[in-house]
Image (tube, helix red, strand yellow):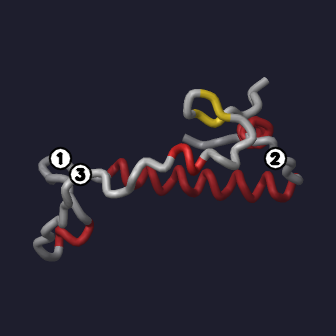
């Protein structure tokens, strides 16, 4: 998959970025380079290879240190919302930003 300059313009528009022509060309080459790396990685046959739970697991046995899933902090919702400009039913009220 290769991007075109029109794709870069559309992405920049969606991201609300103003890119000069030099920046646009640089982004085009960088993104196409990233896609090239991904295509090379996808071309490697990984059938029969089990996924690793940790990157170091290929070198040595890794024992994951798991802890109990318990709440260790008290609920300070009211104290945390004291300085909020607007709160309703325990939720922060914020202005609508999506048009």
- Residue nearest the viewer, comparing 35 with 17: 17
Q: From the viewer's perspective, is residue 6 above or below residue 36? A: above
What residue is shown with label 3?
69
Q: Which residue is drawn at 18% across and 66% down?
A: 65
Say whether disc 1 or disc 2 marks the residue closer to the N-terminus: 2
Say whether disc 3 or disc 1 marks the residue closer to the N-terminus: 1
Q: Find the distance from the CA under tag 3 to the CA under tag 2.
A: 42 Å
Q: Position of residue 62 (x, y in %)?
A: 15, 70
How many discs appear?
Answer: 3
Frontmost of labels 3 and 2 is 3
Where, quadrant-wise, is the N terminus in this rendering? top right
Mark 3: give few (<14), some (14-19) or many (20+) Cα within 10 Å: few
Q: Residue furthest bottom?
A: 60
Q: Which mark is residue 17?
A: 2
Frontmost of labels 1 and 2 is 2
Q: Is mark 2 on a helix, strand or loop?
A: loop
Q: Residue 47 carries which label?
A: 1
Q: In which quarter of the image is residue 55?
A: bottom left
Say whether disc 3 or disc 2 marks the residue closer to the N-terminus: 2
Q: Residue 18 carries which label?
A: none
Mark 1: give few (<14), some (14-19) or many (20+) Cα within 10 Å: few
Q: Find the distance from the CA under tag 3 to the CA under tag 1.
A: 35 Å
Side of 49 where 41 appears, left or right: right
Q: Residue at x 70, y 51 (%)?
A: 28
Do the residues bearing badges 3 and 2 touch, measured as CB atoms within 8 Å? no
Q: Which residue is drawn at 20% across and 60% down?
A: 67
């Amino acid at each position: 998959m290769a991007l075109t300059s029109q794709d870069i313009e559309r992405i920049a528009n969606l991201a609300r970025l103003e890119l000069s022509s030099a920046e646009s060309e640089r982004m085009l080459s960088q993104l196409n380079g990233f896609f090239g790396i991904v295509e090379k990685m996808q071309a490697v046959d990984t059938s029969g290879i089990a996924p690793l739970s940790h990157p170091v697991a290929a070198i040595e046995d890794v024992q994951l240190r798991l802890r109990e899933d318990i709440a260790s902090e008290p609920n300070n919702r009211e104290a945390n919302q004291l300085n909020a400009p607007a709160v309703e039913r325990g939720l922060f009220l914020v202005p609508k930003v999506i048009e």
